[in-house]
Image (cartoon, rainbow, N blue to C red):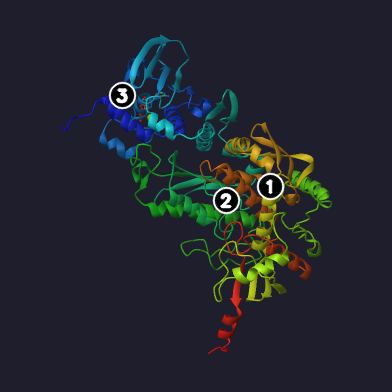
Amino acid sequence: MPIRVLSTEVVNRIAAGEVVERPASVIKELIENAIDAGASEIRLEVTGGGLSQMQVLDDGCGIPSADVELAFKRHSTSKLTSVDDLDDIRTLGFRGEALASIAAVARVTLVTRALDDPVGTLLRIEGGQIVTREPSGRPPGTAITVLDLFFNVPARRKFLRTERTERRHIDTLVTRYAMAYPNLRLTLTHGGRITFQSNGSGDLREVLVSVYGATNASQTIKVDPVETPDTHILVSGYVSAPSLNRSNRSEISIFVNGRWVHDQRLTYAVIQAYHTFLMTGRYPLAVMMVELPPGDVDVNVHPSKTQVRFRDGDAVFRAIQRAVRRTLIDQARVSQIHTASAPTDVPASDSVDAERFGSTEWPSAWPTPEQVVRRAQLRAIGTQSPHPLHPDTPSTQIGLDLTPPATGGTTLTRSTEIATHSPPEGRPPSGQGHPLPPLRVVGQLGLTYIVAEGPGGMFLIDQHAAHERVLYEKYMAEKAQARVATQALLEPVTVELTAEGAGLLEENLETLLALGFDVEPVGGNTALVRAIPAVLINDDIQTLFNEIVADLQAGNEPLAGEIEARIVRRVCKRATIKAGQALSRQEMEELIRQLETCTSPQTCPHGRPTMLHLSATQLAKQFGRLG
Ligand code: ADP
Ligand code: MG
C-alpha cells in the first residue's frame, strides 16, 4: 500500500483516543478550559453518567466570535505562541487538542460570548463537521454541550462501563477540582439533581466538608505552606489524622501547579510520611498542592496532561514527605502525648525522624459527641445481643457462641475424615478444604495465638484469623439460607459519604440488604442506617460504612458475587476477636471446635493462614531425638 498523509478527520479521531477515554475525560478538559478562561463559577450538568449528555457552563472570558471555529481545530490554542512558552506553562491547557478531540467523537454545541462581543455565537459540530453557526444571546462566558459521546466510535463505546461507573469517575474528578480550586463555585448535577456543590469561599476546609462530610472533614489537618528555600517547592494542603484512613490510596490527590497529576511516587511520599502512624495496608486521605517554578516541571508528557516530569523529582518527593510528616508530628505534639520515644524503624530518608513523637492515638479525632451517644445507644442494644463480640466486653463474655453452620457436619464425622485428609507429615496444612483433626487447647500465647495439640503434633492458631474464618463460613451459610441475623438500631444512624460513596451504596443496596444491612440513601451524600448484621452490633457505624464504601470502590465493577464476598469479609473482619485479647480456656476451646467444623479451616477469608503446624516428627528432629 502506498504511504499517504492521513486526512484531518482520521488524525483527529486517532488523537481523540488519547485525550477522550471516557465521559470523565471530557469533563476534565472542559473544566480545565473554564479555569483557564478565569471562570469563578462552573456548572456541570450530566445525564446518563455522561454517556447521553454533559454540559459545562462557565462565566469565564468566552471565545471571541471570530475564533469560534478555530477553537475546534487541532493544535489551535490561545495559550501558547512559541516553543519558549512550553518551558513556562501557567495554564492547564496548552496543546490545543481537547475541543478538536471531543468534537471528533461526539455531537457538540458551543454557545459562547466574549466579554467585548455584543452578541454571542452558537456553533454545532458533529463528528468534527460544523453543522450550524449562528448568533446567540447569552451573558459572557461559555456553555459546551456534549451529546452521544463516541456515537461514531462503536468500539470505544462498547468498552465504556455502566452509567454508574462513569458517573463515579465524574464525581471523583469534579470533587478533586473542587479541592484544588476552593475559590471556584462548582455545581454538579446528575439527571437534574445536585449531587455536589462547593461555595467558592476559598476555604479548602469548607470544600472538604462538602466532599467528605463534616465528621470526616473534622479529622483532617492543615498542612501549612512550607517552601524549600533552594528549590522553591511550596507544599500545602490537608491530610487526614491517622484515625481517618482508607484501605486504598485512591483518596490521596496530588496537584502540581494546580493540575491534578497521577504520580505514584508522590503518592508514596504521602504514604511514607504516615510510617508508624498507620497500620500497614491502611492509607490516608490527602489533598496536596505542590507549587514550583513552571520551568522545573515538564507537563508535556502525555496528551491527557495527567503525568508530569520534574527536573528534581527527589526534591519534590522530600518536600511532600517532610511537610506531611512535620504536620503529623506537630499535631501529635499539640495533643501533648509525649510518652513514647520515636520508633526505631522509621525510614532512613526521613529527615525529621530524630524528633520524638508520641502515641499514634489521635486525640483530635476522638469520637464526636454524636458518635459517643450513638455508641452508647448501640451498646445498650448490644447487651441483649446474641453476639456480644466487643473488645470492651470482659473476656469471659466474649461471645464465641456461634452455632456451627447448618451445612457443616458434626465434629465426630469430621474427625473420622481426618485420617485420610490430614496433610502429609512435615508439611504445614496450608491447602484449603482440609478438615481439622480434633485439637486439645494447651493455652494462649502473647494474647494472640492459641497453642493446641492434635494427633499430628503442635498447632499454633492465630485467634483473629481463625475467628474470622468461623464467622465467614457461618455468615455465608446464613446468607445461603437467606436468614442473616440482623439487628435493628434503636435510632437510625446517619452516615456521611462522598458523592461517589453515596452512588456506590445506592448501586449495591440489594446486596447490602441480603447481607443484613438496612440502609437508605437520603440525598446530600448521606444515608440512614436502620439495621446492621447482628455480629456488628457494637461497631462504629460511620467507620464501618467508610470501609464498606472503600471495598465497593476497590476494583472496577466486580461481579456481584465478588462484591458480596468482599462485604462479608469486611463484616467478619470487623466483628472478629482481635489479637491482644485475653481468651478464657472455654472460649479458646469453643473457637477451636467451631474451626473444626469449617470447610476451609486453614486460611482466613483473606487467604492468610489461620495456623502453623509443627509435626511430631519435626519436633523430634529439632530435639535431636531422631537419627
Ligand atoms: P487548549 O486548552 O489546550 O488551548 P482546547 O482545545 O481545550 O485547547 O481549547 C482551544 C481554545 O479554545 C483555548 O485555547 C481557548 O482559547 C478556547 N476555549 C476553550 N474553552 C474555553 C472556555 N470555556 N472559555 C474560553 N475559551 C475557551
Ligand atoms: Mg483545553
Percent across and percent down for residue 579 are: 67, 64
Res. 73 mark: 3
Is the shortest distance between ligand 1 and the CB of mark 3 under 8 Å? no
Dot 1 or dot 2: first in sequence order is 2
Cα separation between marks 1 and 2: 25 Å
State whether label 1 is within 8 Å of ligand 2.
no
Label 1, on which residue? 479
Location of residue 140 with respect to 233 vertically, above or below? above
- At x 66%, y 58%, the residue is 468
Of all residues, the one furthest to the left in this rendering is 2
Coordinates of residue 158 in the picture (x, y in percent): 43, 32
Query: In the rendered image, which quarter contains the N terminus?
Result: top left
Q: Residues within 10 Å of mark 3 (few under 14, many from 20)?
A: some
Instruction: Please give left or right for residue 9 compared with residue 414 in the image.
Output: left
Residue 285 visible at all: yes
Up/down of 69 relative to 604, above or below: above
Q: Is residue 580 visible?
A: no
Sooner in the amino-acid sequence: mark 3 or mark 1: 3
Q: Nearer the viewer, residue 363 or 268?
A: 268
Question: Distance of mark 3 from mark 1, alpha carbons?
Answer: 58 Å
Ligand 2, seen in the image, is in the quarter at: top left
**Amino acid at the residue labelled 3:** Lys
Q: Secondary structure at mark 2?
A: loop
Using a 10 Å C-alpha cutoff, classify the residue at mark 2 as few (fewer than 14 neighbours), some (14 to 19) or many (20 or more). Answer: some
Mark 3 element type: loop
Three-letter code, disc 1: Lys
Residue 464 spot, x, y in % from top left: 66, 62
> Which amino acid, mark 2?
Ser
Indicate which label's residue lies in the foreground, 2 or 3.
Answer: 2
User: Tag on residue 247?
Assistant: 2
Residue 64 - label: none
